[in-house]
Each structure stands twice: as structure tokens, then as C-alpha cells.
Image: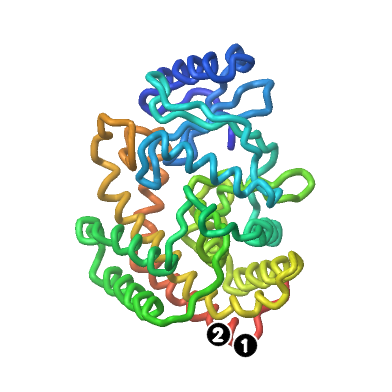
Amino acid sequence: MTTLPGKHHEPAGLPALLDGLRQALRSAQPQLATLPLQPMLDKGLAHHHVRLQGSGLIARLPKQSQMGLPAAANLAYEAACFRRAAASGHVPALAGSLPPGPGLPRGGLLVEEIVGRPARLPDDLPAIATALAALHALPLPPAAERAPLLDAADPLRALQLEIDHQAQHLGAAGLPPRALALIASARAALARQCQAQARPLRRLIAFDAHPGNFLLRADGRAMLVDLEKARYSHPPLDLAHATLYTSTTWDVASHAVLSPRQVAAAYVTWEAAWAAHGHPGDAPGQRPWFVPLRAAMWLWSVTWCAKWRVLAPRDTPAAADGEDWSQQLTADALVAHVRERVDHYLGVPVIEQVADELRTLQQLFDTAAPAP
């Protein structure tokens, strides 16, 4: 999270949103209501971030619900994400909630401000893998206690359905035939995987663990600062999202192109950290899932790119509920960056590059992955 440098193109409605935040603080957190409010650089498509100067807190104000939820339910979901992950020691503390209201239609959360720097890859991959292992090592609650977080009966099949839903936009997104063919081949492979009976273990995962969502504290600890999509699913999905080309080149501050051996080493670091949390027997059993779930996470990412390309030009709906990818909600510079990245990731060269990397990683894991 970076402070806005000088003059910038604000997303539409930000001044009114700051007024709404002030009003919400007067009602819910009056001791914070007089603090200066400092908008932070618009770095994401799902939230505005505002620093409450002098408090050590950040207000996370949803622009939309990536989970497609009504405003109050979305806020409860996000709060649960922070609370469930807190014991890992690698996420900001949740300090309060601001309910949806007239001036703040989607409400907001108050979370601890993490003082740190963006991730530097590949040097910080061990810290990121260690943070993810700490999250994944949290005890799995009884099924009746997992709501409101997603907890599908079959998380792999649920992910396939989510990919299928996003893939409905592939035709309108204007991809070249070669790109469509490669995506179709990967989707067929995932369908075959879903038809088999075997499944990887289930744990709390972030599902949004790209490097741009981490800050590195001065003590070297990696902190995951965005958690709105956490769910009970398969840990290798997070490892994939932390190291895929479509993730490591997404955020300008943490941009890097990793070699297959650097990627494999991050997975091995996770295995060691996972074993150190008391799961030594489980780590080897996850390795056969590393590449298949990496392919699935890439499919989710690339079909999301198609979805964004189609939906971003549309006007934002009048209701402050549900999902909304309209570019009106986001600063011009960020929209331009996302558009450039989406175009890049949907191109044939990048899709072929990802397919080649998957084959190389499978060979590495079939033999011996490099030591971390």
C-alpha cells in the first residue's frame, strides 16, 4: 500500500466516499472520526484504501464484491477472512467494521496498517512460501463452523465451475484461435482431473496470494494484506498464485519473471515449512497436485482476464451490491495498467510460455526439485 504521490486522477466518487467514511466513523468509531484521512494509491480493483493518520489503521472500503455478495454479506465475509487467518501471524489484525450506510454504501473494515515494502522476487519467495505454510497449517474447523467462507463439498469441482462461468466471456473477448485452443486443452485436462476420485487436502487458503498482495516487514516476515477471497480449498492453489507468470508480473512494485527452478524452489520451501508446522507426513503427498492445481489457477486467472476485458467498459450498476468490474470505480492509471496486463496475458506467446513452464515443472517434480 503506497501513499498517493502528488496530483493523480482519482476514481469517480472518491471525495464523496471520504465524506461517507467520516460519517461512518462518527457513528461507529467516534474516537477516530477527527483523524486526517489520507487516500492511498489506487492499486486494486476491489477496494479503496484510506489511512487514518496517527491511528496505525487502514480503512478498506469495498468498490465491489468479488464474491458476488450483497454489501453487508460481503463485509461479513471479508471480516471472517481476517479473523480466520489471524492466528497465522502473517495478516493484518482486524480492528473494526463500518456497516453499510447512506454515505458508505458497501461499508468498510478497519485493519492494522502493515509497515513494510513490496515483495522483491525471487529473494522474498521463501518468506512468502513460509507465510502461506503458516496459513495452511491452521487447524481445519469442523464443517459446521466454516461459514461464511466458501467450503464446497468438492473444492476442485467448484473451481472448475467457477472457471467455466468466467470462460463464458472467452468468445466476446476476441482471443485468437490458437489462444482459445490452448485454453480449451487445459480446461479438458482439468475436467479429467475432476472426474478422478483423488483430491488434495483441504485447508484455509487465501486464493489471492499474488506477490503484490504481500508486504515485507523489517524483520523479514511476509504479511498478506488482502484477504477478501479466502476459502477452504487446496493449498497448492496459493503456491500457484504466488509464482505464476500472470501473478509475478501483475503488480509493478513486485514485477519479476521467475525461472522454473526458482518456482520449484518456492514449492520446496513451502513443503519444508508445512512439515515444520507438524505435518511432515502430509507434505510429500501434495507434490502430485502442484502442477495440476497450478494449471487450474492459471485457468482461473486467464478466464478472469477475458471476463474483465468484456465487463470493464460497462457502466457501474446503480445498486451497491454484488460484483462490479466497471472501470468507473478505478483510477485511470490503474485501469490502463490492468488493460495492458490483460492484453498481454491473453496473447498467444504468454499462453504458450505458461504451457511450456507447466511441462518443465512437471519434469522437475517428477525427478528432484531444487533445494530451497
Residue 46, position as x, y percentages in the image? 43, 40
Going by the numbered disc 2, the residue's amino acid type is: Gln
249 or 234: nearer the viewer: 234
Q: Contact, CB < 8 Å: mark 1 with mark 2?
A: yes
Residue named by callout 2: 363
Camera-side residue of 265 and 143: 143
Kindly give the residue lying farthest to the left in the view shown: 172
Quarter of the image holding residue 351? bottom left
Residue 358 in sight = yes
Residue at 37%, 53% in the rendered image? 342
SS of the residue under disc 1: loop
In the image, taking residue 279 as reference, residue 324 lies left or right, namely left
Residue kind at label 1, given as amino acid type? Thr
The answer to whether 204 appears left or right of 352 in the picture is right
Compute the Cα span from label 1 to label 2. Answer: 6 Å
Left or right: residue 324 compared with residue 61: left
- Where does the image place residue 34, in percent across and percent down from the top left? 60, 12
Q: Quick check: 320 above or below 83?
A: above
Query: Looking at the image, is 359 positioned above or below residue 301?
Result: below
Please tell me in which quadrant of the rendered image residue 361 appears: bottom right
Which residue is disc 1 drawn over?
367
| Looking at the image, residue 201 lies above or below residue 252 | below
Q: How is the image coloured?
A: rainbow
Quick one: SS at disc 2? helix
Front residue of 334 and 126: 126
